[in-house]
Amino acid sequence: MTIEYKTSWRPASAEAEATHLGQLMRARGIDFEALHAWAFDEPEAYWTHVLSELRIVFAVPPKRILESPNRWLPEAQLNIVQSCFERSQGEVALVRGLADGSLEYWSRDQLKARTLRVAAALRDAGIGPGDAVAIAMPMTAESVVIYLAIVWVGAAVVSIADSFSAEEIRTRLDISKTTLVFTQDHIKRGNKTIPLYPRLVEAGAESVVVLAASDALALAVRDQDQPYTDFLNRSDSVVIEPSIGAIDRVSNILFSSGTTGTPKAIPWTQLTPIKAAADAWAHHDIKVGEVVVWPTNLGWMMGPWLIYASLLNGAAIGVFEGSPLGADFARFVDQAKVSMLGVVPSLVKAWRHGGALDGCNWRSIRRYSSTGEASNPADMAWLMAQAGGAPVLEYCGGTEIGGGYLCGSMVQEQRAGQFSTPVFGCRMYLLDDEGLPSSAGEVALVSPQFGASQRLLNGDHERVYFEGMPRGPSGERLRRHGDYMERMATGFYRAHGRVDDTMNLGGIKVSSAEIERVVNRLDGVVESAAVAVSPRGGGPSELVLVVVVHGRAIESLHPAIVAAIRDQLNPLFKVTRTVVRPSLPRTASNKVMRRVLRAELEA
């Protein structure tokens, strides 16, 4: 029997009025559309209100909100982590789900004490402003502490996903000029033990602090490296003042794929975390005392987003130290009374078809949020039913803007797999092939936008985001984003993937060039094109490799491609199929026409 699930949600009047946006609408005596316009047109008023709501602590307050043309919070001095501890010290700040099914609750003062201990050890190791310290490990309670401590001493976190190959790790360490790396000896995934520290050694990391995934380290470390316990014991001090710096001091270096195959190094300043928390305040309506969970990793922007979105809004971060695919995670969400759960669509698909949620009560969830991939409406409707019809707030943005440009909200109708509104403080256009506003096309963001990147560490920021972009209808400066969106007659938005040569696979942004570089090294492969194909029912993109071969046994090609991408790039990038062609379609300038291939594969 086929079960029909509700695909939409509407807030009750009282529920909408109790939200942050509802209260702001009432205070100003205006409706949603007018409030949305006010937030962009009057940045001084809107962002002053948000900074107060988030309790941002300034050592030196900003002279104003925006100084033309794109200088936000001029002359402000602060340490953004200090604001994470501004709420009542007795409130729960972190809920930790352990492998045995038990929970640990850390208060805000306990989280701060742990952070200061690591910060003191970092200071005694000579780490401070101007240094770059990498975290290459799963999202655990201790990795959250390490993240906060690095920013507390004024250094920049270098975000490296624990799924990357040694080669990809080396690239990121080199670009960021990393001083020190924190990692684990291995990763535990069910009955599997996946080595992690050896990958850092192979990547050539000069100095590594190694945490034990279990009670003790499972392997010996090099002479220049040290166990985490030894690192902590180097300092007796637990009192260390936060390093105060300018608003544009780099707090985090994250990486996003570029079309050339070299990852773009995107610096988050101390402004960017405020953007992340502001989206969470306005759209996700995160409130004091809630528990927020998003299975993610500090190697991707949603890891730092989760930290700031939770703590700056007075909520607790929920961290499950295991795989989110199984029943153990589902029970954690139940027992921890999670009120907001973030997902990627491929994870929802696995839950739906794997039975992991059977027997769990997710009625504590007030809303979900989904990002990283296009959603399958049927899967999201099923997910809504698991929490009594709670809405899914679709959220789309990017590392370079520190959050989203499209999202849902708790004061509007929500529909499965669709976005209801541009993010507060953001204005955007959809541009057709002629560069004119349209109901469907490439996303162009109106600049300036609070929290958006203003430079790249290894690239020409102006060329990547602004060169060749037309002016907006009112002469606005437009910023390239690269997503292809459609605004439907209903007013909702639907995602249609990327217009450039990048794609989202399992919530991870990767360029075609990165994948093709690995495939083209295989014997017998003349050239290849990696294409993200949308399945007929909608949902996450599938990776298809189109290859031209010479003297290669075709039956052995697909497993060789799968193995090469797994070992040299990322095991999370699943190749759905391999298609052999005599040649690849190209433009007159010899560029591969992936759109043509995509259309053929989706036909």
Image: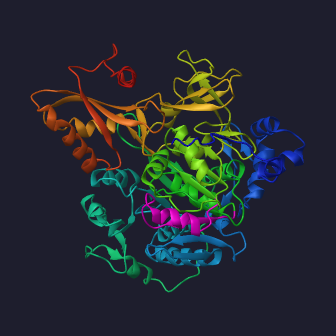
Image position of 160 (left or right of 85): left
Vertical order, 254 against 104 (above or below): above
What is the basis of the colouring in this image?
A: rainbow
Residue 101 horizontal/vertical position (percent):
48, 73
Image position of 552 (left or right of 238): left
Residue 358 horizontal/vertical position (percent):
50, 59
Which residue is depicted at the point 23% across and 20% down? 583
Residue 217: image quadrant is bottom left
Q: Quadrant of the C terminus?
A: top left
Which residue is depicted at the point 33% across and 21% down? 591
Vertical order, 561 against 277 (above or below): above
In-front residue for pair 21/253: 21
Residue 79 horizontal/vertical position (percent):
63, 63
Q: Is residue 286 visible?
A: yes
Specify whether residue 319 is painted magenta: yes
Vertical order, 85 against 6 (above or below): below
Which residue is depicted at the point 53% across and 62% down? 359
Q: Is residue 251 visible?
A: no
In-front residue for pair 172/280: 280
**Range covered by the magenta-colored residues:** 314-339
* Total numbered circles: 0
